[in-house]
Image: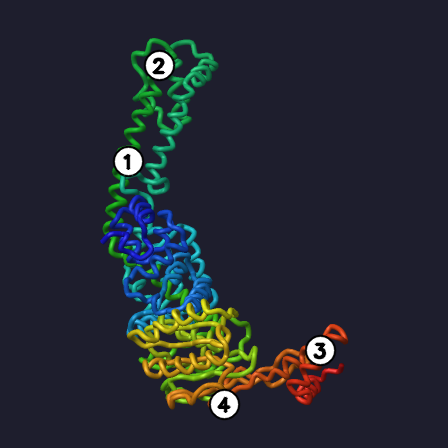
């Protein structure tokens, strides 16, 4: 397969990857979603992530059919990657995409839940040991040696359960033996320091002898300064001095001392040259022997080492996602074929959100807190107050649908999430021109018109075209959603202008209840099913009256109060205990 056949790999990127990794190595890195390998080869992290999100050829990322849906997806994976135990795990989280089958989603969800249970069973000391093992693994560059050490430490920490079976399969004795060999020998046979005491000692002696040879004139002067009178005395002094400096025996130095030197200078030069050559030969021989022994030890444990390397990365991913689920109190959804229903769903992008329950399609949920959503309606039209949380509800539903599509737990007390081939999430954009209308329709209609099952989460068409025409378009979208066996939630302020909805659709409402004592809008974010919500402008006008900067400004807002209902405005201010 050509590298350029992968999405996002052009000629320059292909050349860079092939130069750094070789074609087969680059293909393997892409197929295994190895962000680290691509980044090390010179590809920017962002580009590497985009390439790998589409590398499986199954188009999972294409299920996110709009920019807003992809923005939610990016933000969710950013939250999840923040809980990663290693950089590689964080990279792998960033390239997760919606899975193509219900079975694949359930399998991943089961692994995460098992890892979460195992994590919960650890005490604080064991958790710290696991985190430290992964920190060391990260700091060491995630080498084979670091992976084996981490595997042994994770076993000792007491991780148990299905996600960690691979750790148990590797023979700990074989891993311990390999640990002393891994990282000490390269493919060329070079042996690193620390692998063998004898080799380290020989290298130290060689280094000292080489330094003596480089400073042979200094050595000559040092010996002569001791008052030697003959060449034999000089020879003896030389042997004693070099043996002491190199930690060699006198016999080892005597064996290489020159026999036919013309004078002291020639004796020192020839003897040190012979000593260095002798030590170089000893180092080379010992290094060859040690390298062979190390390779034999690694080969004997190769299967266990490979198991450990793969297991550590898989454990890091599973535990990282488990920590994400634990941090945000996520729960496993019921993965179904159709529909979307949530009890007590929370928006992960907000601090202290009010949980809400909602549904489109069939479900069997019974909400423990809050109302249980209606069953069977394929489409809802959501109405209600400005700043009432309608867009936030759409975003919450998109979070639930996207997380579930990747086989991840969701922010809800309970949930049923169907298999959607396309998730269309469209926020309200404050532009009012034909270009925006056209681009919006081109974004949201094709997924609904194509094959597969679509979830439509669309916010306020009236923001991009005049209200009357927006109502016409919304009617058309609701009917098309029903006709295509899709599911949808459409937010609008135009409920009264809609034609009769099909029996598969309903209208829900969110209601503002007044102002707080601090003059903030008080809203019940839980929709009321089958009820048209009101925008209640008197609450907004009341706040403007109360916050007027001067008398003239207040008189202007009081004129608006008369228009929207002065009595309602005064009651709102009274309920908020405002004194003008």
Mark linked to residue 267: 2
CB under 8 Å between discs 4 and 1: no
Q: Considering the numbered disc 3 on the image, is that residue within a helix, a strand or a loop?
A: helix
Q: Mark 3 and mark 4: span between their CA atoms? A: 33 Å
Q: Is residue 357 above or below residue 76?
A: below
Mark linked to residue 366: none
Other residues around mark 1 within 10 Å, as few (<14) / some (14–19) / many (≥20):
some
Q: Mark 3 and mark 2: span between their CA atoms? A: 110 Å
Instruction: Give the quarter of the image for residue 137.
Output: bottom left
Q: Quadrant of the C terminus?
A: bottom right
Q: Considering the numbered disc 4 on the image, is that residue within a helix, a strand or a loop?
A: loop
Front tag of 3 and 1: 3
**Could you tell which of marks 3 and 2 lies nearer the N-terminus?**
2
Question: What residue is shown with label 1?
Answer: 286
Other residues around mark 3 within 10 Å, as few (<14) / some (14–19) / many (≥20):
few
Looking at the picture, tell me which residue is in the foreground, 135 or 492: 492
**Could you tell which of marks 1 and 2 lies nearer the N-terminus?**
2
Mark linked to residue 556: 3
**Could you tell which of marks 3 and 4 lies nearer the N-terminus?**
4
């Amino acid at each position: 397969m050509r590298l350029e056949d992968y999405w996002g790999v052009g000629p320059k990127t292909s050349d860079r990857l092939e130069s750094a990794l070789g074609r087969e190595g680059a293909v393997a890195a892409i197929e295994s979603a190895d962000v680290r390998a691509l980044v090390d080869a010179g590809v920017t992290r962002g580009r590497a992530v985009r390439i790998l999100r589409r590398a499986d050829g199954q188009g999972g990322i294409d299920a996110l059919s709009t920019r807003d849906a992809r923005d939610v997806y990016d933000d969710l994976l950013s939250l999840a990657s923040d809980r990663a135990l290693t950089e590689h795990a964080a990279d792998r989280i960033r390239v997760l995409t919606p899975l193509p089958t219900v079975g694949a989603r359930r399998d991943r969800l089961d692994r995460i839940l098992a890892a979460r249970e195992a994590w919960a069973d650890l005490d604080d000391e064991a958790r710290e040991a696991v985190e430290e093992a992964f920190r060391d693994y990260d700091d060491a560059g995630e080498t084979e040696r670091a992976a084996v050490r981490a595997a042994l430490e994770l076993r000792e920490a007491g991780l148990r359960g299905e996600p960690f079976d691979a750790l148990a399969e590797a023979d700990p004795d074989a891993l311990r033996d390999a640990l002393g060999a891994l990282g000490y020998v390269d493919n060329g046979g070079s042996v690193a320091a620390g692998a063998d005491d004898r080799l380290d000692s020989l290298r130290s002696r060689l280094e000292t002898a080489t330094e003596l040879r480089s400073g042979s004139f200094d050595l000559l002067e040092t010996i002569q300064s001791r008052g030697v009178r003959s060449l034999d005395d000089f020879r003896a002094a030389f042997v004693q001095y070099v043996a002491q400096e190199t930690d060699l025996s006198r016999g080892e130095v005597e064996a290489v001392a020159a026999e036919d030197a013309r004078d002291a200078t020639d004796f020192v030069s020839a003897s040190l040259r012979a000593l260095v050559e002798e030590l170089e030969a000893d180092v080379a021989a010992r290094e060859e022997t040690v390298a062979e022994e190390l390779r034999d030890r690694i080969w004997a444990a190769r299967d266990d080492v490979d198991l450990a390397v793969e297991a550590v990365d898989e454990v890091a991913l599973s535990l990282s996602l488990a920590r994400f689920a634990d941090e945000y109190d996520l729960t496993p959804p019921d993965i179904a074929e159709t529909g979307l229903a949530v009890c007590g769903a929370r928006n992960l992008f907000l601090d202290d959100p009010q949980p809400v329950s909602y549904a489109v399609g069939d479900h069997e949920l019974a909400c423990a807190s809050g109302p249980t959503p209606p069953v069977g309606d394929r489409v809802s039209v959501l109405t209600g107050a400005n700043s009432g949380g309608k867009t936030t509800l759409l975003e919450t539903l998109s979070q639930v649908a996207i997380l579930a599509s990747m086989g991840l737990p969701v922010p809800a007390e309970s949930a049923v999430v169907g298999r959607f081939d396309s998730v269309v999430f469209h926020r309200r954009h404050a532009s009012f021109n034909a270009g925006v209308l056209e681009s919006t329709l081109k974004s949201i209609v094709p997924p609904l018109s194509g094959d597969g099952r679509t979830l439509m989460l669309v916010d306020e068409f009236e923001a991009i075209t005049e209200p009357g025409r927006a109502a016409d378009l919304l009617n058309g979208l609701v009917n098309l959603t029903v006709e295509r066996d899709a599911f949808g939630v459409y937010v609008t302020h135009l409920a009264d202008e809609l034609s009769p909805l099909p029996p598969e659709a309903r209208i829900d409402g969110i209601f503002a209840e007044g102002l707080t004592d601090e003059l903030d809008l008080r809203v019940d974010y839980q929709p009321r099913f089958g009820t048209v919500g009101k925008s209640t402008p008197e609450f907004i006008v009341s706040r403007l009256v109360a916050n007027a900067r001067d008398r003239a400004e207040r008189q202007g807002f009081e004129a608006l109060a008369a228009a929207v209902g002065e009595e309602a405005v005064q009651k709102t201010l009274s309920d908020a205990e405002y004194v003008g």
